[in-house]
Amino acid sequence: MEQWRVKRMFTVHKSGVIDLAWCPDNIHFASCGNDSLLIIWSINEAGKATMSHDVAPIKIIDVKANGVTFDPFGKFMATQSSEDRTLTIWRLQQNYKNVTQVCQHHSYYKNSMAMSMFRRLSWSADGQIISSTAGKLGAMHTAPLLERSSWKLLATLAGHSKTISSTRFNPRLYKDAAGGCYSVVAAASIDSTISVWKPGMDKPLTVMMDVFKMGITDLSWGFNGNILLASSTDGKVVCVHYEPGVLGEPLSEFEKQRIIETRYGQSTL
C-alpha cells in the first residue's frame, strides 16, 4: 500500500474552500472559497516554499465564486457565484499573472432562489461550450450553455424540478455524421435527479430520478467516458456505466487534435 504525506499547504484562504480546478498545463490550479477570494496557484511556487511558510499565490482576485473551471487550452477561466447570481469569463495571460474580466452574465441566473454552496460548472473538451448551473427561465430550472468567443447563450438544458447544482462534460468527444464532433454533458440537481444530454435531442438521453435521499453535490466522468459518478450529501456515491456505443463513437486522440487544430489553429488561440 502506498504511503502519502502532506508536502505543501496552500493556506491563503481565510474561510472554507468550495471548489478547485486544475489548469490543463498540470502546473497551475485555481481555488475559490467562502471568503470571496479566487486564487490561482502554481506547483512551481510550492517547490520554493518550506513547510513552515505559506505557498505564495500567483494571483488573488477579490470576487464571489462558488465554482471554477478552465478551458481545455488554459486561455480562459469561468467562475460562477450563487450569492450574486453571476457567471464571469476571465482571460488568462502572462503565465496566469494577468487575469482580466471578459464578460459577465446575470440574466440567466437572476431568478434562481437556491443559495446552494456549490456551482459545478464545466467546459467541453473541444473548448466550444461552457455548461453552467442554477439557471431559471420562468418556472423552469435550467443549465445554460454558453458558446466560446461570443460568450452568448447557445442552448439551455431543462427538465429538473429544482436547482441544477452541477454540470459535467464528458472528457471524450464523439463523431457526428458530418465529420465533426459533439460533446455529452451530465446535469444534476438538488432534487436528486441526473440527466445526460446529447446534442440534437429535445429530451435527455438518460434521466435518473430519486437517485439519492438528499441533494447531489458533484459529478465526475471516468477518463474513458463510459462511467459517470455522482455524490450526495446523504453520504453515498452512485456509479452509472454506459455500454460502448451508447453515447456515440469516440474520437481518437489524433482525430481530436486534428479537429482542434482545424478550428483554432496549431497555436490554439
Image (cartoon, grey):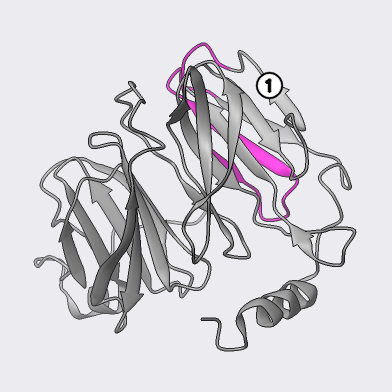
As for residue 222 lying within the magenta part, the answer is yes
Question: Which range of residues does the magenta coloring cover?
Answer: 212-236
Q: Residue furthest bottom?
A: 266
- Left or right: 9, with 177 as reference point: left
Q: Nearer the viewer, residue 122 or 265?
A: 265
- Left or right: 132, with 182 as reference point: left
Residue at the spot x=70%, y=53% of the render?
183
Mark 1 lies on a secondary structure that is strand
Residue at the spot x=73%, y=59% of the render?
173
Q: Disc 1 marks which residue?
A: 208
Residue 218 visible somewhere in the drawing? no
- Left or right: 1, with 180 as reference point: left
Residue 227 visible somewhere in the drawing? yes
Residue at the spot x=48%, y=70% of the render?
24
As for residue 209 lying within the magenta part, the answer is no
Q: Nearer the viewer, residue 135 or 70?
A: 135
Q: Is residue 221 positioned above or below 239 on the image?
A: below
Q: Quadrant of the rendered structure where residue 111 is?
A: top left
- Three-letter code, disc 1: Met
